[in-house]
Amino acid sequence: MKYKLIKETFLNFFQKKKHKIIPSFPIFSKNDPTLFFVNAGMNPFKDYFLGHVTPEYTRIANIQKCLRITGKHNDLENVGYDNYHHTMFEMLGNWSFGDYSRKETIEWAWELLTKIYHIPHQNVYVSVFIGDKKDELSMDKETLKFWKTLIHENNILFFGKKENFWEMGSTGPCGPCSEIHIDLRNEKEKKILSGRYLINKKHPQVIEIWNLVFIEFIRKSDGTLEKLDTKHVDTGMGLERLCMVLQEKISSYETDIFYPIIQDIEYDLGNVYNRKDFNQNVSIRIIADHLRAIVFSILDGQLPSNNGAGYVIRRILRRAVIFCIRFLYKKEPFLYKFVDSLVREMKNSFPELEKKKKYIRNILKEEELSFFSVIEKGSKKIQHIITQHKEKNEQIINGEEIFQLYDTYGFPMELTKTLVEKNNLFIDEKSFQKKLLEQKKRSKKEKNSIIKKDWIQVYHDSYQGQNFVGYDLIECNILILKY
Ligand code: ATP
Ligand code: MG
Ligand code: MG
Ligand code: MG
């Protein structure tokens, strides 16, 4: 099943279950200091969950563009190195705002996965929240009861707060959850070891695909939980991982979402690409992944810039460029070339991409060019430092000097290290780390001075998904959703 059909099947299924189907909200949360980007399908509905607004529809389903590169949900370090974490991904979600509860949520998830998508039921594992002493929460017996009517007990697992209590951020709506994992290993491997021992062990072939969250609390800024008057349901399933399961691939990069783009990159690299080179393979995955995140951010209106969410996007772009330089030996802009490949593959699902293709490609190229000029300037400075040290016969470079290059000129540490090591010199890590720590403390202090209170969100108008244009910051902690 191609990814487009997988998406349509999801939406059709929930439409038949009387859900209002709405489009994805933009990928960024404009001016929201608690959250630069949407990290889960439920974020834009925060106000519904908190009871500040009465929703027009009590059942909604959509496919939300998400980005997990900041805050509580930051997957950046995994991307490219594992088979299923991306910076940007699409989250298939269904919601009940005070409507249905555990029974329907669990039964429908089971029906969709095993009867519509035909995932063999013995490959499915589910988890149940075991409770938590600190928050005075007991085991989620109701969830267990419903799963027991559908699935063998051997396929039910129990976990604590870390795995089975979903929270959007340090404050906000939250609640116990039940996760669905799929064992994709072959029959021989399954006989040697049951999948239940591999859940949450980061096994590349036993992966979490869907989280069913029962939103019943709000986490306050003082860390306490407050019970909500109404119970809600929030579910999220990663499209890329579902494609991996349904297309029987060992990695989401091999699904039809990524593979055609990866093939284009490999082709363009020609002889430079060595199929067996680990770092090159990781770099190609990172390019394909980061490119998608950047393109969709620009498409939704968040351009790379010097501060806030824009800076995060700039850093993602630069991260991909660093991999191009270090492992693919690029000396000039490279990423922008694959905007066309991405648009070609995704325009069926996102027709608006075609119209903005040129614009996006130009922005990428300009960004890459300006980063290459930063690198050129920085390389000269590093080279100067290296020569000075060699002349004085000093092997260790003061970390403060290196930190300044990184902090003031934005010269990437990875490249500094490569250049320094090439010349048989060392960086004094201690003084570098000290400076870095000081900088982190400074920015944390700045951030904390913005986020002091709990969020109150209010809606401007009744919900009209199509025309949503972002959040508007009115006062320090009051947001208005603009339509
Ligand atoms: P993981 O444990 O794999 O990091 P998670 O528990 O953080 O996932 P949830 O917050 O429960 O994920 O999000 C719901 C679903 O979204 C997950 O079950 C998964 O299918 C998908 N998902 C989460 N993070 C990513 C990501 N970085 N890339 C792709 N899909 C993701
Ligand atoms: Mg995660
Ligand atoms: Mg998880
Ligand atoms: Mg999860």
Image (tube, helix red, strand yellow):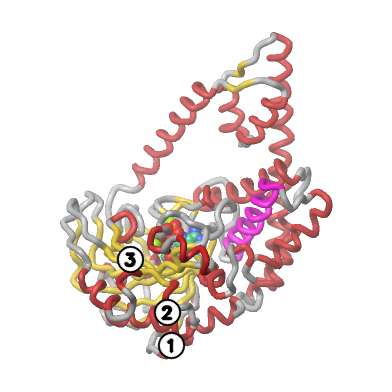
Sequence-first tag of 2 and 1: 1
**Dot 1: few (<14), some (14–19), or many (≥20) neighbours within 10 Å?**
some
* Quadrant including the N terminus: bottom right
Q: Earlier in the sequence, mark 3 or mark 2?
A: 2
Q: Is residue 400 left or right of residue 318?
A: left
Q: Is label 3 in contact with label 1 (beta carbons under 8 Å)?
A: no
Most distant residue in the right direction:
271
* Image position, residue 356 (x, y; %): 68, 68
Separation of residues labelled 2 and 1 (CA atoms): 8 Å
Q: Earlier in the sequence, mark 3 or mark 1?
A: 1
Query: Which amino acid type corresponds to the residue marked 1 in the rendered image?
Result: Gln
> Tag 2: residue type?
Ala
Q: Please name the residue shown 45% across and 70% down the image.
A: 237
Image coordinates for residue 9, horizontal then vertical, percent: 51, 84
What's the magenta region?
277-299
Quarter holding residue 73: bottom left
Q: Position of residue 400 (x, y in %)?
A: 55, 22
Residue 300 in the image: state x and y as whole percent. 56, 65
Instruction: Say which residue label 3 marks.
Output: 127
Residue ID for mark 1: 15
Q: Tell whether 187 sits left or right of 317.
A: left
Measure the alpha-carbon separation of dots 3 and 1: 27 Å
Determine contact: label 2, label 1, CB under 8 Å.
Answer: yes
- Label 1 secondary element: helix
Left of 18 or right of it: where is 315?
right
Check disc 2 and report its element: helix, strand or loop: strand
- Give the labeled residue for mark 2: 61
Q: Can residue 283 be found in the magenta stretch?
A: yes
Which residue occupies 55% across, 54% down? 82
